[in-house]
Image (cartoon, grey):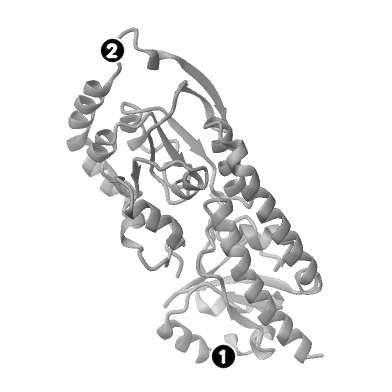
């Protein structure tokens, strides 16, 4: 299962418990690091974000990311963040984050700031950032932690819940940090490879309605083309199974259903599994509704790519290669069926 399948259920509770105890220390650390009057770092500029204007220092050298995606986008630009969530230190096998990024973090002098659902405010302040980067799913605008973080540094917030979020975040960071010339070769590499794969598999991408299926022991959901686990599949022009209105909520996250409702997937030509837990798969094998689905009967069930949430152009290029291999499997099956 993807690490990013849903927000941690205890995130808000843990944050509220820690904010009061940490805020005094954070305020003290932030005050100690504040520039002296007349310092050149007083020069500021305004960045017009999708979530409102943010006053930024003219020179940005130290960046803390409180989400999973931004460190990869920064590393693509040749910038090493000074603070990242702890998964970049613990995911050494590339289960959630491409190894090239976690390895770069491990080799650098970077602070762990806790996880997105349990941030260490003191660690954020200790990293002494010029700016904090967040995404609206991991740090919502109404999160009480935001006020404490703003005592440390201004926060730039990006959206993360549609198929263009990864690209917008990467290109906007390049503009903010004056690294557009660094990003451009990565954009060109990605675009060229995407178009090549798109042309090679044009038939199945247009004719086969796919769904990304997320099964758990007692419930299941599917990821729509707006989910942050499907952006590169969407960018290739894949045709997604039509979802019912009640299958996705206002926050663009999936709603969950019992296995009595598996017949909803009857309109999927291809099912891409986003959970490979053996017990769950065994349970599916014993489920009559599952076995009678057209995609299952036709042998059109495949493992989805492992690093589907996309953080940057470099990350997206890795996902393209994984999707190339996946689409080759689908093509082989379609060809065999005549």
Q: Is residue 105 left or right of residue 267?
A: left
Q: Name the residue under label 1.
A: 288
Q: Is residue 237 left or right of residue 23?
A: right
Residue 178, picture quadrant = top right
Distance in Å between CA atoms under marks 2 and 1: 70 Å
Element at label 2: loop
The answer to whether residue 89 is above or below residue 209 is: above
Q: In this view, does 46 lie to the left or right of 27?
A: right
Residue 260 at x, y = what percent?
A: 54, 79
The answer to whether residue 157 is above or below residue 247 is: above
Q: Is residue 9 visible?
A: no
Q: Disc 2 or disc 1, which is closer to the eye?
A: 2
Residue 93, picture quadrant = bottom left
Name the foreground residue: 178 vs 90: 178
Mark 1 crowdedness (10 Å alpha carbons): few <14, some 14-19, many ≥20? few
Name the foreground residue: 333 vs 270: 333
Residue 176, picture quadrant = top right
Task: Give me the residue at 25% from left, 43% from top.
Answer: 120
Residue 302 at x, y = what percent?
A: 60, 80
Mark 2 crowdedness (10 Å alpha carbons): few <14, some 14-19, many ≥20? few
Element at label 1: helix
Task: Give me the residue at 71% from left, 87% from top.
Answer: 333
Q: In this view, does 249 lie to the left or right of 245?
A: left
Q: Quadrant of the C terminus?
A: bottom right
Q: Quadrant of the N terminus?
A: bottom left
Of the numbered discs in the image, which one, if any, rests on residue 36? Answer: 2
Of the numbered discs in the image, which one, if any, rests on residue 1? Answer: none
Residue 34 at x, y = what percent?
A: 28, 20
Q: How many labels does the image show?
A: 2
């Amino acid at each position: 299962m993807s690490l990013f399948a849903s927000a941690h259920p205890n995130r808000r509770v843990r944050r509220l418990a820690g904010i009061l105890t940490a805020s005094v220390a954070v305020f003290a650390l932030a005050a100690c690091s504040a520039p002296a009057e007349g310092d050149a770092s007083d020069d500021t500029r305004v960045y017009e974000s999708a979530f409102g204007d943010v006053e930024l220092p003219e020179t940005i050298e130290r960046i803390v990311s409180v989400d999973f995606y931004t460190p990869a986008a920064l590393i693509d630009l040749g910038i090493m963040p000074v603070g990242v969530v702890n998964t970049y230190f613990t995911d050494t096998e590339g289960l959630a984050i491409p190894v090239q990024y976690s390895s770069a973090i491990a080799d650098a002098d970077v602070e762990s700031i806790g996880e997105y659902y349990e941030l260490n405010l003191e660690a954020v302040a200790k990293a002494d950032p010029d700016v904090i980067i967040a995404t609206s799913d991991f740090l919502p605008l109404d999160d009480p932690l935001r006020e404490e973080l703003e005592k440390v540094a201004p926060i730039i917030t990006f959206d993360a819940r549609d198929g263009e979020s990864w690209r917008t975040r990467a290109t906007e960071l390049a503009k903010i940090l004056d690294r557009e010339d660094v990003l451009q070769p990565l954009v060109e590499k990605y675009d060229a490879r995407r178009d090549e794969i798109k042309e090679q598999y044009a038939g199945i991408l247009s004719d086969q309605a796919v769904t990304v299926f997320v099964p758990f022991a007692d419930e299941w959901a599917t990821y729509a083309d707006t989910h942050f686990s499907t952006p590169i599949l969407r960018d290739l022009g894949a045709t997604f199974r039509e979802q019912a209105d009640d299958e996705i909520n206002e926050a663009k996250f999936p709603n969950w259903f019992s296995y009595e409702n598996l017949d909803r997937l009857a309109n999927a030509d291809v099912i891409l599994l986003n959970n490979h837990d053996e017990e769950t798969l065994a349970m599916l094998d014993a489920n009559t509704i599952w076995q009678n689905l057209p995609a299952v009967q036709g042998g059109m069930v495949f493992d989805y790519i492992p690093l589907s949430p996309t953080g940057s152009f470099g990350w997206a290029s890795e996902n393209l290669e994984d999707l190339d291999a996946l689409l080759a499997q689908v093509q082989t099956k379609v060809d065999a069926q005549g």
